[in-house]
Image (cartoon, rainbow, N blue to C red):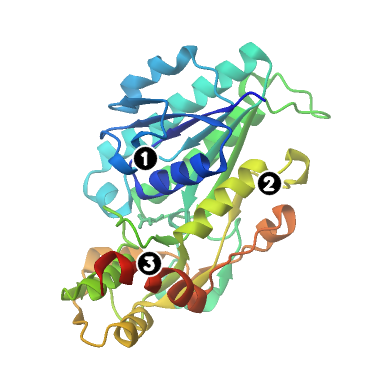
Amino acid sequence: MTATRVLVTGACGEIGQALIQTLAARGGYHITTADLAPLPESIRSMSAEHARGDLIYKIKTFYDYDFDEIYHLAASLSSKAEASGEDAHRINVEGTMQLLMLAAYRSEKYQKSVKFIFPSSIAAYGMQSVSVKYTAGRVKENEYNDPHTMYGCNKLYCEKLGAYYSNYFGQKHSDENPPRFLDFRAIRFPGLISAFTLPSGGTSDYGPEMLHAAAQGKPYACFVREDAQIPFMAMPDAIRSLLMLMDAPRETLTRQTYNVAAFALTAGEFRERALKAFPNAQITFEPSRRRQGIIDSWPQDVDDALARSDWNWKPEYDADAFFDGYFLPEIRMRYNA
Ligand code: SER
């Protein structure tokens, strides 16, 4: 059997590293990677080729490559994007557009499907006020699509661009049987937490930062209020959802962008759980107006019923399973805590 040819951009990020390890363990993939940084030692041997540099300039390298699947993970996260909007737009939007054009061109030229997975975000939502956030409940994909951040605008727009390139580009597909040669699929992720890596430049970062700090016995000042709540997910569930959506037969999908959910906790609840596991942890709250504003605009939780019914999504880790079955055992080993 020939190997599935995969491109992973943003390979050095948290999702990239975990995804590449999972693909390598599954076997049957020829993995090409791209990132601004050199690959970390932990995944270096798993990549057949690494294109290092800005994707916008590197994209030409890939015009002769025949990819079956693309995971486009490269992005500037929400806090960083807010501080540097033009850069974020270039990375998040122009980079995505270049890669979508490449995939559309390859799939049309060879009349074969190229699957394109895009990690979108809860940042695609924008709750008008804190009271709307806490009365809206679990939001559905088509509700509150009114992002308050550069990153959220970028993600929502790229979902639309992906749909455009896969459904309408060139207006060549008949309505009855759209071949969708570029097969674009997106997941709106909650905040992700890994026991092995830390995020950088995001706004949900207070969750993982607080837990890693507690495990290392380092003091941590949380940049949002105790009552701030957004949904979170364990990294292994995030990777599983990417692979499940990638592998789902096209005809089972009723849409191109899906919510996935696992557990939603307040920052105060994170602190309580951290203190239970590490009683000497020093966690205080020093909310930043800017970052609190971003979290206030994100939903307290999302409704993932469509992912559950269309491609059988179900998280393995709810809050208890996340702490007891994944994070705490792994982190204790890692930091000897
Ligand atoms: N975790 C991301 C961020 O905080 C949201 O998708 O920017």
Mark 2 is surrounded, within 10 Å at the Cα level, by few (under 14), some (14 to 19) or many (20 or more) other residues, namely some
Q: Which residue is mark 1?
A: 43
Q: Secondary structure at mark 2?
A: loop
- The correct choice, above or below, for 226 with respect to 29 in the image is below
Side (left or right) of 75 relative to 187: left
Q: CA distance from mark 1 to mark 3?
A: 19 Å
Q: Is residue 326 visible?
A: yes
From the top left corner, tell me how far across and down residue 330 is, in percent: 38, 67
Quadrant of the drawing holding the N terminus: top right
Residue 130 higher or lower than 98, as above or below: below
Image quarter where the C terminus lies is bottom left
Alpha-carbon span between mark 2 and mark 3: 36 Å
Q: Residue at x 50, y 46 (%)?
A: 22
- Amino acid identity at mark 1: Ile
Residue 173, percent from left and from top: 73, 22
Q: Which residue is mark 2?
A: 255
What residue sits right under mark 3 in the picture?
Answer: 330
Q: Can I make out residue 133 in this image?
A: no
